[in-house]
Image: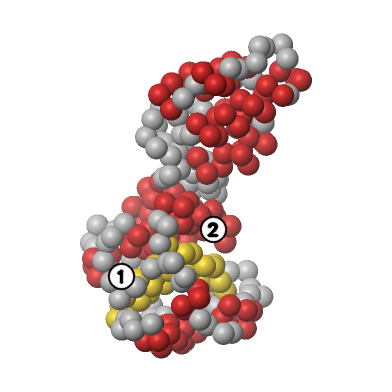
Amino acid sequence: MESLCSINSKKSKTCMNMKSLKKIANRLNKDKRFDHYKDIDIQKYNKKNKEKLVHEIKKKITCDSKLDFCILKKNKTFLKMIKDDFKPKGPIDKDEWLSSLDLINVMEHYEKKYEDFEFIGPYPIDFKYIYEEFFNLNLKKLMKNKKRLGIVFNTDTSNGPGEHWISLFLDLDSNTICFFDSAGDNPPKEVMNLIKEFKKECKKINEKMSVIINKKQFQFDNSSCGVWSLFHIISRLKGESCNFIYKNKKSNDKLMYKKRKEYFRK
C-alpha cells in the first residue's frame, strides 16, 4: 500500500505526530456531538504509545478504517490542523497536468524538511513584469539564511492557460545554477536573463557560479512536465548533481508516474 505520509512524518504506524493527535483529541473532547463517548485522557499518551491514541480517536468518531486518513474524512477541520503530516492531495487523473497549487503544496513540505532551501514561484514566463521581487533582485536578501533556491516557471504568459513547466535550481554550496526542461530545450530568454542576473548577484557575495543546462529530452508524454520539474528540484535537494540528473538513463516518463504517487496522495 502506498504511504499517505508526508516526507516530514517520522516512521511509525501512524503519519500523525503527537502534537497533531493531541490537537484532535482536545477538539473532540470539547465537541458536544461526541458526548456519547468518554473524554480521551490525553495526558497518558506519548510518542511511544501514540498508536493507542489514534485508536481512541477512531473509536470516538466511529471510524472503522485501518487507515488514519479516515479521521480527516470525518472532520475537515482536522485536515487543516494536521495537513503537514500527510502528502498533499494531487490530481485525480494520472495524466492530469499539475497546477501551480499542486507544485506549491509539494514544495512546502520540502521547505520544512530542508531548512536551507527556499522555493519561489511558480511564475509565468513574463514574471519580470508581474512580480515585484524581480524588479529589484537582491539575492542576498532573498536567500537570507538560505543556501539553495528552487524556482518553477511556466513557458506561457500570465494571461495564458499554461503551456509547459520548467525549473531552475541555485545552490551556493556547490556554486551551481542548474536549468532543467524535460523537453531538452534551452532556457527561454527571460530565464536566461535571470540566470545572468543571478550570476552578477552571486559575485557581490563572492560566489562564482557555474551554469549547467540540461540538453537531453526526457519527456515524451504530454502531461508530466510538472512532475519532472519537482523531480529536478527534489533530486538536487537530496544531493544529486546536475550532471548526474541530466545524464541519468534510468529517468523516463514511466518513472515520473511513480514519482507522482510518491509526491501526492489520491
- Above or below residue 24? Residue 235 is below
- Residue type, label 2: Ile
Label 1, residues with CA under 10 Å away: few <14, some 14-19, many ≥20: few
Does the rendering let one see residue 149? yes
Identify residue for label 1.
173
135 or 99, nearer to the observer: 135
Q: Viewed as shown, does residue 24 lie left or right of 30? A: left
Residue 31 point in image, percent of width and height: 73, 24
Residue 100 point in image, percent of width and height: 57, 61
Seen at 59% across and 84% down, the residue is 135
Seen at 42% across and 51% down, the residue is 113
Residue positioned most to the front: 43
- Residue type, label 1: Asp
Based on the displayed image, in which of its 4 quarters is residue 198 positioned? bottom left
Residue 53 point in image, percent of width and height: 52, 21
134 or 235, nearer to the observer: 134
Identify residue for label 2.
104
Based on the displayed image, in which of its 4 quarters is residue 89 positioned? top right
